[in-house]
Image (cartoon, rainbow, N blue to C red):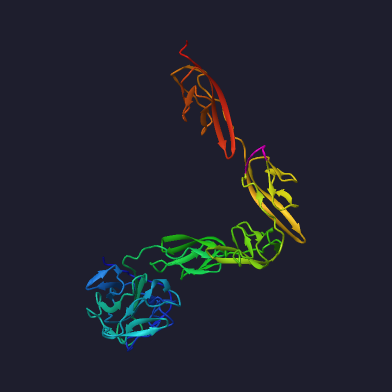
């Protein structure tokens, strides 16, 4: 596909010096026709473009115009002009360059791909111009066809090597001045054109890291260059307009947009907070066999001790138990994707009394029932952590309602208090609904019994009949039997009974 651009009047100022008597070309202050910041024009001849100097820029590959480029491949930038005026214009000059779309029109415009600096067409040279390089005339160039009158053509072909894959879009800029060769600046005509082209297969997508930490940086990219980046909330995520560089400023979410002409892409960028840990609160000493509770206002962290349990042990909830005399460092560590934060607290362990061991081993109890606890160390005091149960001064614990409770037995000796503990679970007795089925049946027959309470066990009190786990009873001998349906919950059992009369076949 052949892609052409006819570029007409655009206001601006630049200088392409090529009169009927000049021997070379020079551009000053940047030329819009080269993609740099500035205007476009040839003020040394006149200030207006001439639309009847038709100017076309195209990219050519092996004699065939193309509408894309392949990274690293060699091409020809073909600049073609035609005199459609009534003025005789037999010679011309030009200036052209290849600029990255993402920097075009700014003071930082830069070349994309490589413009040849050898084997150039006759009357041409490669010239540095600020941050980029241009190809331009060295003297007046004869028309390609015609004697300067209407229909005269001007053409120049410039070698260009495409940039490496993934470089994005490129814009070819050019300015062409047709001259009448009368030794004066009057009567000469100029026009300019550009041609934008994408890399083959360049997707219109946003790539890059979209989850950041406060204070961190990242860069979003779109393979199709030349667009503009923006942020829905720069206070959360700032983005460089032309670079896609991100700066995460504070916790939150911002939408980053990439706009290229009429097309727009958007992606959400999440900024996570850096972890912080609050101070550890609680006593700074404990006795061997004793327990203290530490806490912090920061949730979700992990407790540890530097001695790894040799001087003291710390639980997942921050309870510190003294193991042996000495000093230990308790650490509370909080972490997330943005790093790690921690706080430490020095704990001194003093030699303290032995709080013994609470017995019995059994730790389950039914609501309303009691259990006598004991400890081989005498003289201590009993307590519980919450009101799921109550305990007397002698260690008799009674389950009040369903739940979990911790029983403590504390021994005080000097300034040290040691305590042993026992976690107990209290269960409500299960509710069992009644039994349904025949109240009598004959010897040798069957009957099925049921209860609306699930997961129970069927039993019978004598050998007059047998009942299986599905509630099916088979009568053996005459007499009375009692069926029991039992349901358990933890250590707690509840049941219902049902009397069945077995007849000897009605005799």
Residue 233, by quadrant, is bottom right
134 sits to left or right of 398: left
* 187 relative to 436, above or below: below
The segment highlighted magenta reads 364-370
Query: Relative to the observer, which residue lies in front, 168 or 397?
Result: 397
177 sits to left or right of 144: right
- Tell me the quadrant of the picture where the N terminus can be found: bottom left
* Residue 268 in view, yes or no: yes
Residue 180, by quadrant, is bottom left
* Residue 18 in view, yes or no: no
* Residue depicted at 71% across the width and 64% down the height: 351
Q: How many marks overall?
A: 0
Q: Residue 272 in magenta? A: no
Q: Residue 2 at x, y = what percent?
A: 26, 67
* 472 relative to 4, above or below: above
Query: Relative to the observer, which residue lies in front, 60 or 449?
Result: 449
Query: Relative to the observer, which residue lies in front, 198 or 17?
Result: 198
Q: Residue 489 at x, y = what percent?
A: 57, 38
Q: Residue 367 in magenta? A: yes
Q: Residue 45 at x, y = what percent?
A: 37, 82
* Residue depicted at 52% across the width and 32% down the height: 456
Query: Relative to the observer, which residue lies in front, 110 or 478?
Result: 478
Residue 151, by quadrant, is bottom left
Q: Give the farthest residue toward the right.
A: 414
* 211 relative to 120, above or below: above
Q: Residue 176 at x, y = what percent?
A: 33, 78
């Amino acid at each position: 596909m052949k892609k052409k651009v006819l570029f007409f009047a655009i206001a601006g100022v630049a200088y392409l010096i090529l009169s009927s008597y000049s021997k070379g070309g020079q551009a000053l202050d940047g030329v819009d026709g080269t993609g740099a910041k500035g205007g476009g024009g040839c003020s040394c001849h006149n200030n207006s473009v001439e639309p009847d100097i038709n100017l076309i820029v195209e990219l050519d590959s092996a004699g065939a115009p193309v509408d894309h480029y392949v990274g690293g491949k060699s091409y020809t930038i073909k600049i073609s002009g035609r005199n459609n005026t009534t003025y005789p214009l037999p010679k011309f000059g030009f200036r052209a360059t290849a600029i990255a779309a993402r920097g075009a029109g700014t003071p930082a415009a830069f070349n994309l791909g490589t413009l040849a600096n050898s084997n150039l067409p006759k009357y041409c040279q490669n010239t540095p111009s600020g941050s980029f390089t241009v190809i331009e005339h060295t003297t007046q160039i004869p028309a390609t066809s015609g004697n300067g009158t209407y229909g005269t053509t001007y053409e120049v072909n410039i070698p260009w090597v495409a940039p490496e894959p993934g470089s994005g879009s490129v814009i070819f800029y050019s300015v062409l001045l047709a001259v009448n060769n009368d030794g004066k600046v009057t009567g000469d005509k100029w026009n300019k054109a550009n041609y934008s082209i994408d890399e083959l297969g360049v997707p219109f997508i946003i790539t890059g890291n979209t989850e950041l930490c406060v204070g961190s940086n990242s860069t979003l990219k779109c393979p199709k260059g030349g667009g503009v980046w923006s942020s829905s909330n720069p206070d959360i995520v700032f983005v460089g307009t032309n670079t896609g560089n991100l700066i995460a400023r504070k916790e939150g979410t911002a939408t980053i947009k990439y706009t290229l002409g009429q097309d727009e892409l958007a992606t959400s960028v999440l900024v996570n907070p850096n972890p912080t840990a609050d101070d550890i609160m609680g006593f700074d000493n404990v006795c061997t066999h004793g327990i203290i509770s530490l806490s912090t206002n920061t949730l979700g962290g992990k407790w540890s001790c530097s001695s790894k349990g040799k001087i003291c042990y710390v639980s997942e909830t921050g309870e510190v138990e003294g193991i042996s005399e000495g000093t230990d460092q308790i650490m509370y560590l909080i972490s997330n994707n943005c790093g790690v934060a921690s706080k430490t607290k020095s704990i001194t362990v003093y030699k303290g009394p032995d709080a013994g061991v609470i017995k019995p081993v059994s730790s389950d109890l039914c609501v309303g029932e009691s259990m006598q606890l004991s400890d081989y160390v005498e003289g201590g005091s009993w307590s519980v952590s919450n009101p799921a149960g109550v305990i007397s001064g002698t260690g008799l614990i009674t389950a009040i309602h369903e739940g979990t409770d911790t029983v403590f037995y504390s021994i005080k000796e000097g300034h040290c208090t040691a305590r042993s503990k026992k976690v107990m679970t209290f269960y409500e007795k299960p509710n069992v609904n009644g039994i349904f089925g025949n109240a009598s049946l004959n010897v040798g027959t069957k009957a099925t019994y049921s209860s609306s309470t699930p997961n129970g066990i069927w039993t019978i009190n004598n050998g007059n009949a047998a009942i299986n786990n599905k509630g099916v009873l088979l009568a053996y001998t005459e007499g009375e039997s009692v069926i029991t349906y039992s349901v358990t919950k933890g250590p707690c059992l509840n049941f219902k009974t049902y009397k069945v009369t077995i007849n000897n076949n009605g005799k």
